[in-house]
Amino acid sequence: VCSSDLLSARAQLIADWNAAAETAVVFNPDFPGSAELAAYYAEQRHIPKERVIGLRCSQEDSISRGEFEAQLRGPLLQLFESRHWWNAEPPTPGKPLTGDGISSTTTPSSKVRVLVLMRGIPFQIRRAAQKPKQSEEDEASVDSELAVLGLNNPPVKGGLRNPYFDQQTRFPHAQNSLGLLIVGRLDGPDDPTVKRMIDDAIYAEQTGLLGRAVIDLAQKNGVYQEGEDWLKNSAESYRRAGIPVFIDRSAEVLRDGWPLPDTIFYFGWYTDHIVGALASPAFRFKRGAIACHLHSFSASIIRSHDRAWAGPLLSHGAAVTFGNVFEPYLALTLHFDIFNKRLLEGFTVGEAAWNATPALSWMNVVLGDPLYRPFGKGIGTKLGEGSDRDYALYQGMALRLAGEPDGHIKTALTEFAEKRKRPRLLELTALLSALQSKLPQAIDLLEHAESTTQDAAELLRLRLYRAEMLRRSEKADAARKLLREALEETRFKDQPARTAAESLLKDMGG
C-alpha cells in the first residue's frame, strides 16, 4: 500500500469532527478593532453570534495573575456554566509536572471544545513568585491557562502534563482530554495582518497548500539535540508526503537574501529576533504558510513587525506560527515533528499544535486560526493550477512511486520535466537528491534546470543552490567560480538574491 493510500485512509478516518460547530470566540470590547475582527472571523467560519463573547479586560499584553482570574478565567467559567457549555461529569486531568494532583468538577460537553482569542486579549500572565524553583514558575501564557479552564483550581505553580500529548486520534475522541480546550489566538502586529491570516487559512483549505518546506538546522548537540531531531524528523515527514524540502545545514540562520520561493513550511532555530533570509524585505511566505522559529521568548512580543519571531513571521505572510511568552524549557515546548505528523494526517492546526505540546498551564501560544485544516481531504488531492502545478505533479509522482526504489522516482520526474520543459520540477528533484545527501546528482539536476530557463530570478536561484551543493561537496573552487561569474552578469545586478551570492562568496574566502 503506498503512502498516499495510507494518508487518504487516515484523513477519511478522522474526518468526522466539525470543529467550527464547537467553537467560541472571545474579544476585548475596549481594544480597538477586536470586536470587528471577532465578527469577521465568526462570519467566515459560520460561528453563531451567541458564541462570540466580549470580555472587558486589560489592553496591555501582560497582566497579573489576579487580573487574569478576575477579567478572564472567572467570567469565562461563569459564562460556560450559565450557558450549559459544561457537563458535571468529572474528567481525569493531566498530572502536574511537579507537586500534588488536582481535582476537576467540570468538563466541556459537545457544545464547546475550541476557544479562539482575538487580538486585544492579553497573552502573558506575569510572574509573582520570587526566585521559584525550575518548573515551578507561576508565570504563563493566558492561552495555555485557558486550555485548562474546565479543571477545578489548576495549580498556579508549574505546568500540567498534557493528556492529549502525542495521541493518535482527534481531540473529541482522545483519552483523558475532558476538561481541556483547544485554544488558538488570532493576533499579530496589526488588524490587516490578522484578517489576512483568517483569509489565507480558508483560501489554502479551498485551493490546497502546495509549495516547499524549509528546515533551518543550527547544528546543536548535547542537551539541544532533541530540537535538531524534531527538525530532521519533520523533513522526513515532508519527504514521505511528497513535499520538497530544503535543509540549511549551517549553524547560522539562513543568510540574508537567500531565495526561498513558495515556502509553505518553515521550521528553524535559535536566535532572539528575526534575522537572515526571512527578514529580507523581498521575502514573503506563500498563502496559508505555517512557520515557527524555536526560541524561548519567540512570542514574548506578538504585536510587532520586527521584534522577536512571532509577529515578524506573520508580517512576512505566514498564516500560522507558534511561540513561547516566557522560558518554557526545550522539552516542554511544541515538538515540531509531532505537529507536522498530525497536520499531514489531517488534524486542524489547533489540534496538531496542542497534540505536540507536552505541558498545559505553561508558556506556549498558537497564533493563527485553530480551525485551519490544510490537509483535511488528504495529501495529494489537489491538482494545482498555474505555478502550483509543478508541486502537485511532484507530490503526485512521489506518492504514487513511494514503494519504488529512489532512482525510479527521480528518473520519472526528470523525464517528465524534460518533456514538458519545467525547470522548477528539475529543481525540486534536485532538492530531493540533496535531502538524501546525493550531492553530485543534485548538482547535475540544478545545472540541467538552468539550461531550460531564461528567467533571471530563477537562474540566479538555481546557481546559488548549485554553489551551495558544490560547497557541501568540498568543491569550493568550483563554487567560488560559479558565484563570481554570476555576480559579473548584469542581468542579476538588481536581483534580491544577489545579496546572498555576495555573502556566500565572502564566507568562502571570496
Image (cartoon, rainbow, N blue to C red):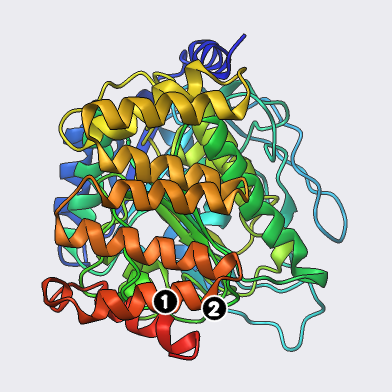
Give how far across and how far down residue 163 sits, in percent: 72, 39
Quarter assignment of residue 485 = bottom left
Q: Quick one: which residue is furthest to the right in this view?
A: 100
Q: Residues within 10 Å of mark 1 (few under 14, many from 20)?
A: many
Task: Tell me residue 140's x, y (percent).
Answer: 59, 67
Q: Secondary structure at mark 1?
A: loop
Q: Nearer the viewer, residue 92 or 281?
A: 281
Residue at numbered disc 1: 255
Quarter of the image with the N terminus is top right
Answer above or below: position of 57 versus 256.
above
Which residue is depicted at the point 87% across and 60% down?
A: 99
On the image, which quarter does residue 334 sit in?
Answer: bottom right
Q: Which residue is mark 2?
A: 252
Using residue 78 as the reference point, say whether residue 389 is left or right of it.
Answer: left
Instruction: Look at 51% across and 40% down and name the residue there.
Output: 182
Task: Give the percent coordinates (x, y) of residue 232.
Answer: 64, 51
Lateral position of residue 93 relative to residue 304, left or right: right
Give how far apart the Cα atoms at labels 1 and 2 are: 8 Å
Residue 409 visible in the current orientation: yes
Asked whether the beta carbons under mark 1 and mark 2 sit within 8 Å of each other, the answer is yes
